Image: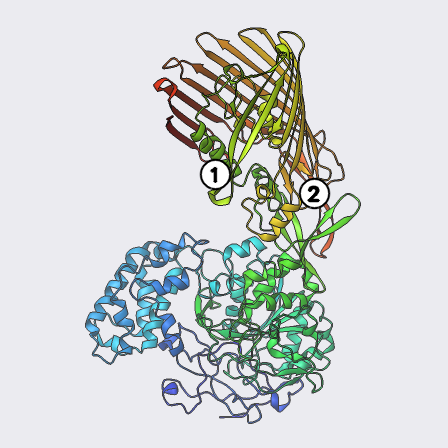
Amino acid sequence: MVSVKGRLGAAALAVTVSAVALTAPAAAQDVPAPKPLEAKTTSARPLASQAGTITPTRGMIRAHMDEISPFWSDGPQVGIDVDPETGELEPFWGKLEPYRGMIRAHEGELTALAGMIRAHEGDLEGMRGMIRAHMGELSATARMIRAHDTSAVVDYAAALSDYRAFISQSEAFWAVPVQKETGKSFSTVITDPLLNKYGIDLNDAQSLAKLSGDQREMFFLEWHDNLMQFSGADQVDHWMKSIGWSPALTQQQGSGTRAVIGLVDFFVAKDPDIAQKVIYSGGYTAFTGHGAGVGSLILASHDGKGVMGIAPNARVAAYNPFDATHTASWTDVTKGIIAVNKAGANVINLSLGVPGHTFHSEWRNVFKTSEVNNYKDTSLYVIAAGNSGVTQTANVNFKDAFDNTFLVVGSVSPDNVISDFSNRPGFVCLTDDGTCKNTMRAGVGRTGDTFLKSDYLKESGLLMNRFLVAPGEMILVADGEGGVTRMSGTSFAAPLVAGAIALIHDRWPWLKKYPRDVAKILLDSATDLGEPGADPVYGRGLLNIERAQGVLDFDRLKYELWNGSSKTDLTVSTLKTKGFQQIWSDKDMYFAAFEKIDSAERDFLIPLSSRLFGTMRNGQYFQEFVYNHFVNWLQTGVGFTGVNPQRGFGFTDTMATPDANLGNGWSFSMTGRLVAEHYGGGGIGAPQLRSSVTVAAPQSRVRFTFGSGDGAVSLGGRMGLQTSSDFDPYTGGVNPLLGFASGGAHVASTLAVSRDFEVSFGATSRRMSTREMTLGIADIDDRGLMSRNRYAADAMTVRVDYRPANWLGVSGSFTRLEEDRAFLGTLSLANSDFGDGTTTDGITVQADLNLDEGMVVFGSATGARTANRDDAAAFRMAGRGALGSAYQIGAAKQGLLGRNDRLRMTLAQPLTIERGAIEFTSIMVIDRETGDKGPVTQRFDLGNQRRRAVAEVLYGTPLMGGLAELSMFGRGELRAVDAAVPRIMIGAQGSMRF
């Protein structure tokens, strides 16, 4: 043992599983004595004795080293006691015992392994078969892996047979890809090297007996890792699911393209993947693989082989402070920090430290250095906590260094328990010249509030409030030579945090200038572990990348409306409502919502359909159709009883009374139907009466109609086209403008100019109830918004009917639809989006042809144009507005199979936008580097919608002299446009009167 002072080591770089004293008996029996290390002569300022000296390679767990010793490394075995004053050397060795339950992944059907390595199977579907293909039915594997756990006599001969079967099954599947990629046999590349490495002789059962339990476990883990190199898919590791990361998330959030990572670590340019991303490399050129391992977790490409980095498209500015002796001084570390900052790094990973300290006091001098302090507003430092397995008890004077922002990262096991080797923050404080000015613990207190601002990160306070944990045990990393290995330590937890920061910098580049805000995002989004809130073991909790990329607090989320001259902020707790008009989603329309962090804010692009409410969707089409066109139809059939055949040819879902004499030639009649009010989930409420009254003058020269409900049928129906669904904009093709305004009060007057010519004037309105508006909206806040912003529409129509012959009738009508704050049935959660609303003018032409033998052919066609009523609205029709069309044709026959049966067949194209565009202006980020905001106008073509074709058949016949009735019904969507709408619906019913 020697005393080495004046040099800094890197205890946090790579570690064993648990710290054990040098005198511990079993732990050291297979480990060579540590080699003495001479102090390096340097011109750098000597460090104070408390700084101590460590080596970054000591204790590195390299699962693929000879003898599978978790304590070996390829550098000097040097360590420092937890008391740096003594200078007493001690290696950080330990046993793999803590991993036993987690590494033993190949038992039985490999279910344990499936839970760890298949966590992202949805994103890597192609891997599923390959990962497990070489395993087969390996129930016997449990015996050979767990043999050291039992005192019973082990049948090593039977176990050896299992090994042979295991290897044979592997070779059968993997031989071809191995040969294809390497040009060598499976045995040469996989089997022989691993058997030789572990000393396994397939003809000697005793060779298995010589292996320790840890070695047996590591053999299978290394076998898996080696084969995965030939799978054609990047390898999934256990840490990914723990911290909410997947390759898909990285791809969606930018992959780190705009980020520069500072890596103060061993030389990385030797790694073939990372080398191509290095924009700066300085310092020494000592190589151990440690720097490449750390860097790979951030930067490794998603190239179908090996490790996947969190930010694979980021660039790296690297500086190696470790010389040939694998030690570093604080001076070299400071030089490295300055160098990578100058090279453009905004997040700097520091997997180094002093044993026995979670956060060493010397960091104050590093951050006080003027050249380091120059980057206080642009750099965020990620520091590994160290691997002594201690809880820090000594406060750290951090006076004059608080302006720099840093996070300290500890390690947890795959089951999210603090690692035995990981240092912990305890209750220590970063003091201001000995005074702890803030003893508040984040998330602890009567309200459990987190810090609302990030100021606490530049003030005196508890270290636990800056402490995170991340997986750091048996992490798959690059070995720096083009292969992979497994390492453990807080060194490999820290880069996971650095990678998460890189994704934030890529998605919101302006946050590079707000390091405290970024730190607050990571701390506030962490998954709480241990005691509620910040605690002395886990700090703020487990890194959660998915949460960090999402909204932290919906209550603080807002979006900004633009009316052409000014903006208005609108805060809403959630924007979870799904869009109901497919066209808005199809056109990729979106808006920006903003979340204030502290000094800065970040934007979230939300599909515009999340803000819109379509009056004819969200299942209403289906429910309306089922209840009104099926349930009620089951009650009334196709309407034989009481139908005036001159008005509807016997096909209508409204029942009519015969004309009643009022005297002096005046008469009246009524039509109506009961509609079951429906709720979400298919529930049926109280029935509603929709009715109309018609009063006719003598010889019907003047008629007046008024009522509530089916205004479209009353104003626009004619021979064969008198069901409510004919006028529905989503289910039928007859004058959809009347359909938008149908449901409330309606009134009409008709003047018979001559026997064959009539002129009609009418109006109808619709005011949606709160229940209709909120149908299917689960979120209480969105329900509240919708209840305040109800859909309202009014339609006026002028119509002329002409019958030049008994067998021919034609009509033409002009309809004007006015919608308040809406566009063709669509309105927004923000009632000012459509301004004063829109006006749609439409022309409808109808005709019916009466053939012989009770046959009639009919049709209707509508063309419409929609324009703005408010040119300053956020949503505007571009140019001359939007053009739409709808049509419906059909035929009806009376006396098809019997004297009084009736059949109706129709084909409809519901309302379709033929041409037009929407312009939408909202406040968005217009410079993604600076975060500057301004009004942005998006223009989306609404034309070229896929046309729907809807066919319907109705048939009914009276039986038993009118005492009974048989009815049949069928409807089909001939083109699949909306997955929520059933393609075919059919039904039949019979009824009898008593």
At horizontal 74% and vertical 77% (from top left) the residue drawn is 370
**Marking on residue 979:** 1
Which quadrant is home to the C terminus?
A: top left
Residue 833 - label? 2
Q: How far apart are the two marked residues, 1 and 2, measured between alpha carbons? A: 28 Å
Q: Is residue 884 above or below residue 120?
A: above
SS at mark 2?
loop
**Which residue is outermost to the right?**
565
Q: Residues within 10 Å of mark 2 (few under 14, many from 20)?
A: many
Residue type (three-letter) at the residue carrying disc 2: Asp
Badge 1 marks a residue whose secondary structure is loop
Residue 556, position in %: x, y?
66, 59
Q: Where is residue 226 in the image (x, y as percent from the top left)?
A: 38, 64
Q: In this view, does 135 lie above or below 908?
A: below
Residue 281 lies left or right of residue 644; in this view the side is right
Q: How crowded is mark 1: few (under 14 residues within 10 Å), some or many (20 or more)?
A: few
Say whether disc 1 or disc 2 marks the residue closer to the N-terminus: 2
Q: Position of residue 724 (x, y in %)?
A: 54, 27
Most extreme residue toward the top is 805
**Quarter occupied by residue 250:** bottom right
